[in-house]
Amino acid sequence: MDKPIPRATQRPAAFTRPAHWTNAPAPAPQPMQRGEDPDGLDPTRFGDWEKNGIAIDF
């Protein structure tokens, strides 16, 4: 049986980190803020889209 190819544990020496990479921790999740839907559709009410009193699940 063939041995699996070992995974790299270090980046190559020539690798330079992109300027947009950061070591800052991920931001804490914020509570959801419900906005007004201009079409009157609200998919979060029952988990389905609702239009004219009919639930539509795609």
Image (cartoon, rainbow, N blue to C red):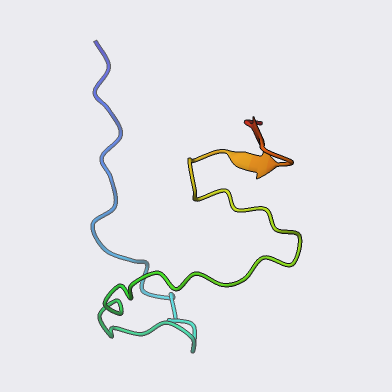
Residue at image point 28% right, 83% down: 23
Q: Is residue 39 above or below residue 55?
A: below
Q: Say whether residue 52 is left or right of residue 44.
A: right
Q: Is residue 21 above or below residue 34?
A: below
Instruction: Please state the total of marks drawn on the protein image.
Output: 0
Q: Position of residue 11 (x, y in %)?
A: 33, 66
Q: In the picture, residue 9 is in which quadrant?
A: bottom left
Q: Is residue 48 above or below residue 13?
A: above
Residue at image point 25% right, 40% down: 6
- Residue at the limit of the structure toward the bottom, as seen here: 19
Q: Nearer the viewer, residue 3 or 31?
A: 31
Q: In the picture, residue 2 is in which quadrant?
A: top left
Q: Nearer the viewer, residue 22 or 15?
A: 22
Q: Nearer the viewer, residue 46 or 7?
A: 46
Q: Position of residue 35 (x, y in %)?
A: 56, 72
Q: In the picture, residue 49 is in which quadrant?
A: top right
If the image is split into quadrants, where does the C terminus sit?
Answer: top right
Residue at image point 49% right, 48% down: 45
If the image is split into quadrants, where does the N terminus sit?
Answer: top left
Q: Nearer the viewer, residue 1 or 24?
A: 24
Q: Say whether residue 47 is left or right of residue 13.
A: right
Residue at image point 24% right, 23% down: 3
- Residue at the limit of the structure toward the front, as seen here: 53
Q: Position of residue 29 (x, y in %)?
A: 30, 72
Q: Say whether residue 45 is left or right of residue 41.
A: left
